[in-house]
Amino acid sequence: MVSDTEHIAGVQDPTAQSQPLWKRARRRLYRFTFTKRKLSTKNLDRLCREYATAERTLVIHSEDVDYKPHFPNAFTVTKRPDKPADMHVDLYYRDLSKIASESYPVIVCTGLLEHIPDPERIVADMRRILEPGGRLVISASAVFSFHECPDNFFHFTPYGFKLLFKDWTRFDMLRGSSQPFETIGILIQRIHLQCDIFPLARPFIELLFHTIGILDVFVVRQYETRQFLDERSRIDSMLPSNLQAVVVK
């Protein structure tokens, strides 16, 4: 399966080189795409733009977005030995315990929480590292495909986030990253990315995931349940691909 940290085009299958040329050609046809960028990336770009700061920032794992223009004073941490970073850690980021308490005013963490088997532990670690009143800018999977398995443990709801951050002072922001038809487009792209599909169908599927989000202009209001379709259950997005939050220690 394709790693989320790689560009969509040009991903290499380690078993491909041992196969006959015709099988390699067929595999490429079944996986070919014109799209070089994931649709979900623009929502991470928006998050970074909105909460950009020149303050000292601990950037944890946020490899699917170019955070550098927005957090120029960043100390970077990753589990991936092939990625340049200021600190390389273990698979589940237990090495964050080596970072001093109350040492950063801002932490940015995207695309990681769903890959941690004990998210309460890493949330507590980030709270410890933040200065009093410090901010955590975080994004994690909600309605999204399985990815980077077997290390894909949780996908979150707003209520899951509120439970995880119950000991923090407040949310400055909690929202879905995408609108419902946009999310369907993101999921169709993931099907395109993570499945072998008959080659003649692939361009039509690619056109579909680029255009289906247009239907969001017709969505007037959204609700988080069918139990009562009124103000009690109004929500910004009932089908987001990710949840995004800014949480204050």
Image (cartoon, grey):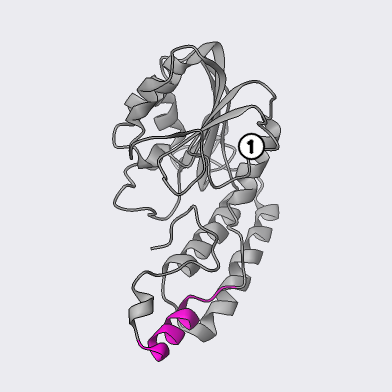
Q: Which residues are magenta?
A: 20-33
Amino acid found under the numbered disc labelled 1: Leu
Whether the magenta-drawn stretch holds residue 29 is answered as yes
Depicted 189 relative to depicted 163: above or below: below
Which sits in the foreground, 173 or 1? Answer: 1
Which sits in the foreground, 241 or 60? Answer: 60
Magenta stretch prevailing secondary structure: helix
Q: Residue furthest top?
A: 132
Q: Position of residue 101 (x, y in %)?
A: 44, 12
- Callout 1: SS: helix
Let me know if residue 37 appears in the view. yes
> Which residue is painted at 57% across and 60% down in the image?
185
Whether the magenta-drawn stretch holds residue 204 is answered as no
> Which residue is painted at 44% across and 22% down in the image?
126
Q: Position of residue 173 (x, y in %)?
A: 59, 26
How many numbered marks have been drawn onto this rendered protein structure?
1
Q: Quadrant of the N terminus?
A: bottom left
Quarter location, residue 55:
top right
Let me know if residue 156 appears in the view. no
Depicted 37 relative to depicted 13: above or below: above
Residue 69 placement, left or right of 194: right
Q: Position of residue 33 (x, y in %)?
A: 56, 73
Q: Which residue is denoted by mark 1 in the rendering?
A: 47
Q: Residue furthest bottom?
A: 22
Residue 109 placement, left or right of 151: right
For disc 1, the neighbor class at 10 Å (few under 14, some 14 to 19, many from 20) is many
Which sits in the foreground, 146 or 240? Answer: 146
Q: Position of residue 231 (x, y in %)?
A: 57, 31
